[in-house]
Amino acid sequence: MTDTLQKSTLQELAARLEFYRELGIYDFYRRGAAATVAADSVLAGVATDSQAQHAVTAASAATERPQPAPFSSSSIPPASQESTIPRRTLVSDQPVPPLVSFAPVLPAEQRPAALAAVRELIGECQRCQLAQGRNKIVFADGDPNAQLMFVGEGPGADEDAQGLPFVGRAGQLLNNMIAAMGLKREQVYIANIVKCRPPQNRKPEPDEANTCMPFLERQIEIVRPRVLVALGATAATYLLGMRGSIASMRGRIHDYRGIQTVVTYHPAFLLRDPTQKKEAWKDLQMAMSALGIKAPSRAPQA
C-alpha cells in the first residue's frame, strides 16, 4: 500500500514538473544562496537599494542553466506539437524575484512594508510585451493580513485605467460575491496572474505569465492567506500547475504550498453565463467552510 502511494505521488510530481517545463519554468529547485539573499534583502529592508538590486541580478544570472532532462514516467502522455509552448525572448533583462524563497512568516505589522517592497521591485516594469500597451500597473488591493485571497487572470480596461484589480463590471460582481460570504472587500486580498492588461483582454501568453508569477508568489508568501480562490482557468493553471477545464478542477480543495485553494468561475464568465452563479456559490461555500465561516443555505442574488 505504501509503495503504491509513493509511486502515485512521484508520478504526480513528475507530471507537474513536466507541465512547468512546457510553460518554460525550469528553476524551481537547486537555487544558490544569492537568490535567497536577494529576496530576503529586498523584503526585510536590510540592504541598500543598490545592494538589493545587485543581489537580485546575481540571483537571476545564477539560475540560468540548461533545461534539465525530462522525467520518464509511463503516466505522462507525450506532449503533442499543439501543446508545446515556446519560450519567447523578453524585451528586458530587469531582475525578477526568485520563484521560491521559503521566507519565514512575517509578523502582521511588517507585511504592508514587505508588499510595498515587492511593488517597488516591479517598478515601471518592461520585462514582457504587456508593458507596451498598458496604462497602469495593477498590483493588488485589500488587506495585507487577509485570511482569504482571490487571484484572477489579468486587468481589464477599467483596472488598467485605475490601477486596481476588479473595479469594472466583473469587479462589482466579485464585490457581491464577497459580501454574500459575509465579508467586505477590505477584508480580503485581490491580485492577478499578470499585472498589466493584455491587448483586447486576451489570455496572457505563457512568457508573460511566467515573468509576472514570481511577484504574485511573493505576494502570496507575504500575505499567507488561509484560503486562496482561483478565479478562472488561467489563474488555476498557473497557481496549481494543472491543465484542464474549470469543470475538472472545481468541486474539491486543492493545495498551493500548504494553502487550501478553491477553483471557481471568473466573474467575467458569470456575467456572460449567469446560470453558473449557483455553481460558483457552491465553490465559495467550500472556501467559507475552510475558513470556518457559516454559509447561508441559499445562493445570493447577484
Image (spheres, rainbow, N blue to C red):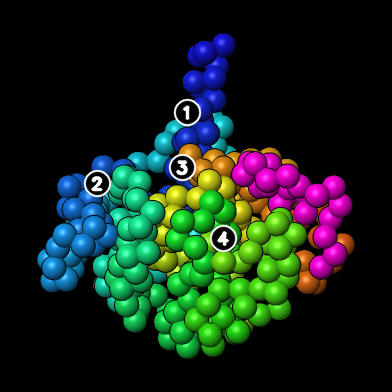
Residue receiving disc 3: 257
Magenta region: 281-302
Marks 4 and 3, how far apart at CA? 19 Å
- Mark closest to the chain's N terminus, 4 or 1: 1
Q: Which mark's residue is nearer the viewer, 2 or 4?
A: 4
| Residue 118 visible in the displayed image | no
| Residue type marked 2 | Arg
- Mark closest to the chain's N terminus, 4 or 3: 4
Q: Is residue 126 above or below residue 149?
A: below
| Residue type marked 4 | Val
Q: Could you say which is closer to the camera, residue 213 or residue 139?
A: 139
Residue receiving disc 1: 10
Badge 1 crowding class, 10 Å Cα cut-off, few under 14, some 14 to 19, many 20 or more, is: few
Residue 11 point in image, percent of width and height: 51, 30
Q: Could you say which is closer to the camera, residue 225 or residue 252?
A: 225
Q: Is residue 38 left or right of residue 142?
A: left
Badge 4 crowding class, 10 Å Cα cut-off, few under 14, some 14 to 19, many 20 or more, is: some
Q: Is residue 296 left or right of residue 118?
A: right
- Mark closest to the chain's N terminus, 2 or 3: 2
Residue receiving disc 4: 188
- Magenta stretch containing residue 282, yes or no? yes
Q: Count the numbered circles shown.
A: 4
Q: Is residue 191 left or right of residue 167?
A: left
Marks 1 and 3, how far apart at CA? 17 Å
- Magenta stretch containing residue 74, yes or no? no
Label 4 sits on a secondary structure element that is loop
Label 3 sits on a secondary structure element that is loop
- Mark closest to the chain's N terminus, 1 or 2: 1
Q: Could you say which is closer to the camera, residue 73 or residue 142?
A: 142
Give the label on residue 31, or none: 2
Residue 240 point in image, percent of width and height: 54, 48
Residue 24 point in image, percent of width and height: 41, 57
